[in-house]
Amino acid sequence: MDKTHKKNMHTFRTDDALRVFIESVMQEQKLSKTEMICNAIKQTYALDMFEKRFSH
């Protein structure tokens, strides 16, 4: 299995989990969708940087 295919599968699973997480947090905290999307983008960006740093 080549790396890009593996990465895409990983990305799909992460996005799916993130969406479920966002929905549950929205229900708990009653945040607006805009706030949640901003937070999600920050978290995803941080996760991406983390993966780049430690994937070598």
Image: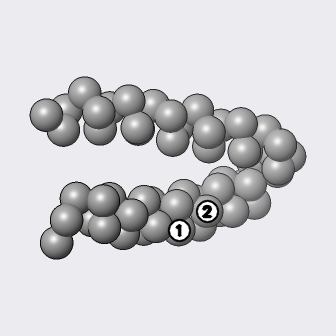
Which residue is drawn at the image coordinates 30% and 59% (left, top)?
Answer: 4
Residue 19 in the image: above or below residue 38: below
**Would you say residue 17 is visible in this rendering?**
no
Look at label 1 and name its amino acid.
Asp
Q: Which mark is residue 16?
A: 1
Where residue 30 appears, x then y in whole percent? 82, 50
Which residue is drawn at the image coordinates 53% and 68% (left, top)?
Answer: 16
Q: Nearer the viewer, residue 9 or 25?
A: 9
Tell me if mark 1 has few (under 14), some (14-19) or many (20+) residues whose alpha carbon lies within 10 angstroms of its own. few
Residue 21 left/right relative to 7: right
Q: Disc 2 on helix, strand or loop? A: helix
Q: Nearer the viewer, residue 36 or 44?
A: 44
Q: Identify residue for label 2.
A: 19
Where residue 35 appears, x then y in whole percent? 78, 39
**Would you say residue 13 is visible in this rendering?**
yes
Q: Which quarter of the figure is the N terminus placed in?
A: bottom left
Residue 51 in the image: above or below residue 33: above
Q: Could you tell me how far apart the alpha carbons at marks 1 and 2 are, in whole angstroms?
A: 5 Å
Dividing the picture into quadrants, the one containing residue 52 is top left
Which residue is drawn at the image coordinates 36% and 69% (left, top)?
Answer: 9
Which residue is drawn at the image coordinates 75% and 60% (left, top)?
Answer: 27
Look at label 2 and name its amino acid.
Arg
Dividing the picture into quadrants, the one containing residue 53 is top left
Q: Nearer the viewer, residue 15 or 35?
A: 15
Q: Are marks 1 and 2 in contact (CB under 8 Å)?
A: yes
Where residue 31 appears, x then y in whole percent? 81, 45
Residue 18 in the image: above or below residue 48: below
Residue 46 left/right relative to 19: left
